[in-house]
Image (tube, rainbow, N blue to C red):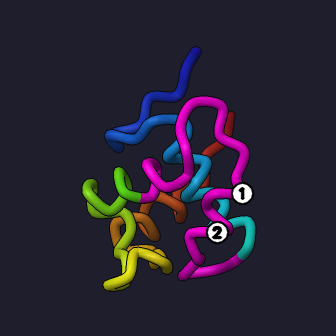
């Protein structure tokens, strides 16, 4: 039985957010996001998509991305398969 999330996120976007949790970081540079293995999209597009959905905030130069309260709420979910 699949787990249905009430968040409009793709699997690659969730991988990006999970990387923040894995590294225990609130902010990551774009280079770290680019290095996450994405089978579908580039890290830049995923980071921009998450900014558009309100899960990340980018600095003026689009070099560093910070979690928002919305993404912290998502990452706080204690999911069990």
31 vs 24, nearest the viewer:
31
Residue at x 49% of width, y 46% of height: 13
The reply, left or right, for residue 47 in relation to residue 54 is right
Magenta-colored stretch includes residue 29: yes
As helix, strand or loop, the secondary structure at mark 1 comes to loop
Residue picked out by circle 1? 35
Tell me the residue at 55%/44% (across/down): 42
Residue 70: x %, y % from top left: 34, 66
In the image shown, does 5 or 55 lie closer to the viewer? 55
Quadrant of image for the C terminus: top right
Q: x, y percentage for residue 53? A: 27, 54
Q: How far apart are marks 2 and 1 (CA)?
A: 6 Å
In the image, which residues are magenta? 24-47
Q: What SS does tag 2 mark?
A: helix
Q: Which residue carries the number 2 mark?
A: 31
Q: In this view, does 30 lie to the left or right of 46?
A: right
Q: Is residue 62 above or below residue 47?
A: below
């Amino acid at each position: 039985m699949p787990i249905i999330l009430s968040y409009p996120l793709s699997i690659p976007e969730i991988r990006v957010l999970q990387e923040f949790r894995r590294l225990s970081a609130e902010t990551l540079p774009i280079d770290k996001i680019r290095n996450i293995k994405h089978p579908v999209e580039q890290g830049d597009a995923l980071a921009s998509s998450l900014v558009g959905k309100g899960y990340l905030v980018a600095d003026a130069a689009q070099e560093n991305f910070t979690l928002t309260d919305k993404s912290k709420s998502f990452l706080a979910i204690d999911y069990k398969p």
